[in-house]
Amino acid sequence: MKLCELLVNIKALAIEGNTDIEITGINIDSRKICKGHLFVAIKGTVTDGHQYISKAIELGASAVLCETLPEKTANGVTYIKVESTEDAAGKAATAFYGFPSEKLKLIGVTGTNGKTTIATLLYNMFRKFGHRCGLLSTVCNYIEGKPVPADHTTPDPIELNRLLKCMADEGCEYVFMECSSHAIAQKRIGGLKFAGGIFTNLTRDHLDYHKTFENYRDAKKAFFDSMPKEAFVITNADDKNGAVMVQNTKATVKTYSTRTLADFRAKIIECHFEGMYIEINGMEVGVQFIGKFNVSNLLAVYGTAVMLGKKPEDVLLVLSTLKSVSGRLEPLRANEGFTVIVDYAHTPDALENVLNAIHEVLDGKGNVITVCGAGGNRDKGKRPLMAQEAVKQSDKVIITSDNPRFEEPQDIINDMIAGLTPQQMRKTASIIDRKEAIRTACMIAQKGDVILIAGKGHENYQEIKGVKHHFDDKEIVRDILGI
Ligand SMILES: CC(=O)N[C@H]1[C@@H](OP(=O)(O)OP(=O)(O)OC[C@H]2O[C@@H](n3ccc(=O)[nH]c3=O)[C@H](O)[C@@H]2O)O[C@H](CO)[C@@H](O)[C@@H]1O[C@H](C)C(=O)N[C@@H](C)C(=O)N[C@H](CCC(=O)O)C(=O)O
Ligand SMILES: Nc1ncnc2c1ncn2[C@@H]1O[C@H](COP(=O)(O)OP(=O)(O)OP(=O)(O)O)[C@@H](O)[C@H]1O
Ligand SMILES: N[C@H](CCC[C@H](N)C(=O)O)C(=O)O
Ligand SMILES: [Mg+2]
């Protein structure tokens, strides 16, 4: 593709060199540059991409998008100066890959919790309706059934547009994707055309990155602010920030709620560990999920499907066949008569909700033992709050390691325990080794009890000092229990 075609939606402040040249690829990482590529220099949180411009040229870059022109420019290389390369990267990437989001219906899901669940259920539902679909999510990306491993919840703009192009080429009609707050703030989704957007909820997370809750909220809101007039957005009327999110959007707004008047409403009629009977807009349906928050997730799925033109009765039929997403409230039964639930709750709010869901079903008929930790090099403020939530609704808590990353595991545990009173400490133990913590929980559990193993869900690794060691909560439970 010609460089000038790639720049169609980008406002250049200055151009040095020829834009009538062929570009063979585009990259924001100099290490991935090959001959004929465009290198986009981005100021990051760790380093500044502008430092790698000469490296990129050595590797064959024939054009550079930057915010400041280097003092010495290289012969035969075209330089384009823009105000924000972060903003230009997405626009250039989507042009390079032929505007793939315009060839399909792209639906984005944002909010603190529930993104993976909703995006995955929509993907499974629309495939059951017979459509070719794509999924971009934390657990794994899929191009019409073909898995493509995911490193991020939302990939960088180059990888994102490359995957969307593959999906469009494969004939996908719908793509469901998670939009993380990092991705929105860093404009990884810049230049994409969304047909719909979903807001789940907003509670504390990622304050290491966004610094304040207001910044975090505004990052999420920016997604809806940028939605086009022809699109629809579905927001959670039960969340304090549900209305704020959509107050400046040009798109058609619909609401969902389990508590108040809304376009899509639901309530629980009955629940068991196997599932629930719920009523959606006056129609009853049996679903294979538990927990009030999953009713909200299912409502978002239902509303989106209806907004995409599906008949309500057909949607409910498919909804009743959907199963829980890997590592999200996933139950495992021990021969000894207790239940182990593996869940990805890694925020105070998610822990509270998951424990609520467990108690709704348990109904006082057994004890709850919670095994949880908190990730290293991430929001420290959530640690004591997570321990408090675990202790509030458990009979016994074992605080352990999550992904310590570059921190000392004991320091993270200490941060968590600092949130507990001496009385709460009496029902709390700490075991650094996560496998030992799980084994201990399985040893003390009695018939009828529930063990919640929270924080890692689908993850099949434990990240310690930059190395990802194989580690899978579900595999370990099956091993210990011989199931
Ligand atoms: C804090 C954060 O979000 N960081 C992301 C960000 O990196 P950064 O700003 O730190 O980049 P940097 O390392 O400072 O480098 C600046 C630029 O120089 C370039 N560079 C760097 C070195 C070099 O030799 N050559 C070179 O060109 C880099 O490619 C980059 O373009 O941009 C990179 C490219 O898009 C991301 O890979 C990186 O994700 C890091 C690894 C990360 O851990 N991110 C997490 C926090 C994240 O994004 N999480 C969200 C949400 C999770 C959830 O709740 O679901 C996600 O979407 O996954
Ligand atoms: N609607 C919801 N409200 C509150 N908590 C939820 C909701 N849905 C899921 N959860 C809890 O949050 C955890 C993560 O769910 P899920 O993976 O769907 O969210 P996510 O938004 O994709 O998270 P991430 O930001 O890590 O990608 C679940 O394991 C569950 O404990
Ligand atoms: N996508 C989230 C997941 C956290 C999962 C938890 N296991 C941890 O490592 O903290 C993040 O990057 O903050
Ligand atoms: Mg996710």
Image (cartoon, rainbow, N blue to C red):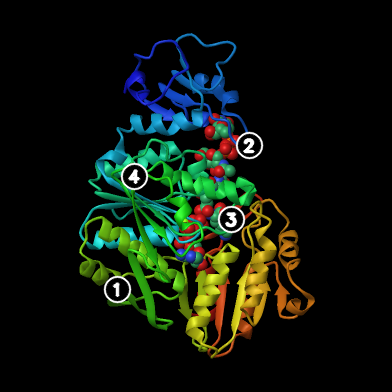
Does label 3 or label 1 sit earlier along the sequence? 3
Nearer the camera: disc 1 or disc 2: 1
Amino acid at circle 4: Phe
* Residues at discs 4 and 2 in contact (Cβ within 8 Å): no
Q: Mark 1 points at which residue?
A: 320
Residue 144 is at least partly visible in this image: yes
Give the residue at x 20% y 64%.
311
Asked which secondary structure carries label 4, the reply is loop
Asked which secondary structure carries label 3, the reply is loop
**Horizontal relation, residue 459 to residue 100: left or right:** right
Amino acid at circle 2: Val
Q: Is mark 2 within 8 Å of ligand 1?
A: yes
Amino acid at circle 1: Ser
Distance, label 1 to label 4, CA atoms, is 27 Å
Does label 3 or label 2 sit earlier along the sequence? 2
Q: Is mark 3 within 8 Å of ligand 1?
A: yes
Q: Name the residue under label 2.
A: 46
Nearer the camera: disc 3 or disc 2: 3
Q: Mark 4 points at which residue?
A: 194
